[in-house]
Image (tube, rainbow, N blue to C red):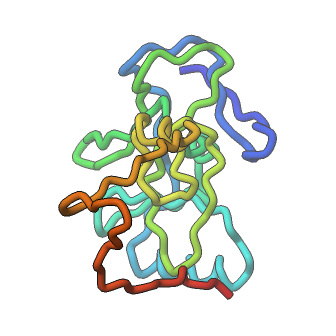
Amino acid sequence: AVVSTQSTGGRGWGMIALEEIKEGQFVHEYVGEIIDEQEVARRLQLYQATGVTDYYILTVETSRIIDAKPKANNARFMNHACDPNCETQKWNVCGLTCIGLFAKRKIAVGEELTFDYQFDTRGEEKKACLCGSDNCSGYLGVPAKKTEEKKREKMPSKKKSKKKKSVGRPRRKGQQAASSSTTSTPAQSD
């Protein structure tokens, strides 16, 4: 597919379709330096120590991981989305497993190309998701919300006034209810 790398405003750089892309069509290959898990750990520690927050690591197989930071093509600029228009697929080329990005649906000219990073969070800190999808989870590595769940969140809650129902037999005028009353106070937050 014919694509271009462009600024996407608050989301940094992104990849934009310059032609219509059909559902299932190959968009781009994700390439970079092939490293192992030990090198990933070393690099992530280095990135954290030096304040680097943007990295482009994608696992092909347990022992083969692509780091698209030092060497890559423009596929590394594809942003994450909780409702992406592309997906990664593993394919075999001459016995070597590669990662291809394919359109999940028809993509219009000028539309940003995105895929689900399936981000693996290391440590406690979560990275905010900026995709803006209706089903956005709010954070990378947190599964996207189901569309219906998101709709319920946005809808104002309708409180119904419930009539208190009495339990037990009805009382006669002037008769007090016998009960073992316990009082509770709401928890105070500091």
Who is closer to the viewer here, 107 or 157?
157
Indicate the position of residue 87 as horizontal and vertical percent values.
41, 37
Camera-side residue: 167 or 107? 167
Image location of residue 45, percent across then percent down: 58, 83
The residue shown at (19%, 63%) is 168
Q: Work out whether residue 82 can be spotted.
A: no
Q: Is 104 left, or right, of 161 in this rendering?
A: left
Q: Is residue 138 visible?
A: yes
Rendering coords of residue 137 (x, y %):
51, 51
Please tell me whether residue 40 is drawn above or below residue 117 in the rendered image: below
In this orientation, which residue lies closer to the viewer: 123 or 181? Answer: 181
Count of numbered circles in the view? 0
Seen at 48% across and 80% down, the residue is: 41
**Residue farthest left in this picture:** 169
Q: In the visual, does 62 lie left or right of 184?
A: left
* Residue found at the very far front of the displayed protein: 174
Q: Quadrant of the C terminus?
A: bottom right
Along the horizontal axis of the image, is 109 left or right of 12? left
Q: Is residue 7 above or below residue 4?
A: below
Residue 61 is drawn in which quadrant?
bottom left
